[in-house]
Image: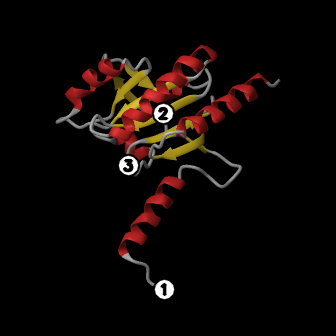
Amino acid sequence: MRFPHWCTGAFLMLAFTASLVAEEGKTAKAPDFSLKTMKGENFILQENLGKGPIVINFWATWCGPCLLEMKNMKKLYEKYSPKGVQMVSISIDDNKTQQQVPGVVQSFKFPYTILLDGNKDVYRAFKVPNVPQLFVLDENGAIVYNHQGYQKGDEKKTEAVLVKLLADKKQP
């Protein structure tokens, strides 16, 4: 049976994204990375594990749904960062648009860590097909939630995952 060209591409994109999340009930480890913050400091994923869940989203200044997702991440950050949740937004803006990142971050007052991935090395390592893409890692770096795109209400799913991770952490 032959599938239309667009169907094959959609299937490959889905398979590519799903490859980071192992079989149901199992988790895949997030690839370690090191990126610069907007202040020029190094952020190394491995050094931030063990403190609590980490939310990572990939975004770009030119992506409207990304900015909507990040506004809602801000609310989750304010609610859950005191409980140990870290949030990291990775900009995939290239050399042409990367100078817009600080203005966007300042305009929206995003309080969490903003990283720059202009070469898209981390984007490729996480096998992201398109932005926005959000991952939730447990404190050991296992990917426990992975969501592509953004629609109003998606933040409720992310929050439910965070609540469960925080509750599991309290268990002896």
Amino acid at the residue labelled 1: Met
Residue farthest toward the left in the current orientation of the protein: 96
Where disc 2 sits, the SS reads strand
**Is 136 positioned to the left or the right of 74 in the image?**
right
Amino acid at the residue labelled 3: Asn
Residue farthest toward the front in the current orientation of the protein: 152
Task: Tell me: residue 34, above or below residue 23.
Answer: above
Q: Residues within 10 Å of mark 1 (few under 14, many from 20)?
A: few
Q: CA distance from mark 3 to mark 2?
A: 14 Å
Q: CA distance from mark 3 to mark 1?
A: 28 Å
Q: What residue lies at 76% left-to-right and 22% top-to-bottom?
A: 170
Residue farthest toward the bottom in the current orientation of the protein: 1
**Is 167 positioned to the left or the right of 118 in the image?**
right
In the drawing, what numbered circle is on residue 56? 2
Q: Position of residue 91 (x, y in %)?
A: 34, 33
Q: What residue lies at 48% left-to-right and 33% top-to-bottom?
A: 56
Where disc 1 sits, the SS reads loop
Q: What residue lies at 54% left-to-right and 39% top-to-bottom?
A: 153
Q: Are marks 1 and 2 in contact (CB under 8 Å)?
A: no
In depth, the one of 120 and 104 nearer the eye is 104
In depth, the one of 109 and 56 nearer the eye is 109
Identify the residue under disc 1: 1
Identify the residue under disc 3: 130
